[in-house]
Amino acid sequence: MKYETPDGIADFHAAGRHTHITELLRNRATLAEARELARHTDVRQTMKHTHINIHDQAKALSGLPLPKVPEEATEGSWQRNGRLFRSICVK
């Protein structure tokens, strides 16, 4: 992608847009916030400028809490009987 205008002037607005939006999202900005800061009217345009990779996805998942398994449910019991596990965990 060229970041130069027909007059030969570097277009830093376009050059930094992908990095700027991606870094906003990597630093926990919401997609709506990134859309506003990029001055896009449609979030789909903002999404086109994001470059989230597998490392970003892993980082996002690492922040989720681990599921809580009740003490009554042993590893073998919930693996053998999914209904037992669901009946204990889903109330």
Image (cartoon, grey):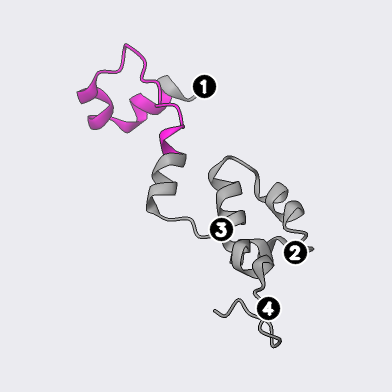
- For this orientation, the residue located farthest to the left is 76
In the image, residue 39 sits, relative to residue 65, either above or below, namely: below
Q: Nearer the viewer, mark 2 or mark 3?
A: 3
- Badge 1 amino acid: Lys
Q: Is residue 53 magenta?
A: no
Distance, label 3 to label 4, CA atoms, is: 20 Å
Which numbered disc covers residue 78? none
Please tell me which residue is depicted at 46% across the width and 32% down the height of the picture: 63
Please tell me which residue is depicted at 47% across the width and 41% down the height of the picture: 60
Which numbered disc covers residue 19? 3
Distance, label 1 to label 2, CA atoms, is: 39 Å
Q: Secondary structure at mark 4?
A: loop
Of pointers 3 and 1, the one earlier in the residue sequence: 3
Q: Secondary structure at mark 1?
A: loop
Q: Which residue is mark 1?
A: 91
Residue bounds of the magenta highlight: 61-87
Asked if disc 3 and disc 4 are in contact, CB closer than 8 Å, the reply is no
Q: Nearer the viewer, mark 4 or mark 1?
A: 4
Q: In the image, residue 11 lies at what x, y percent?
A: 67, 72
Relative placement, left or right, of 76 versus 6 is left
Which numbered disc covers residue 9? 4
Q: Which residue is mark 2?
A: 42
- Badge 2 amino acid: Asp
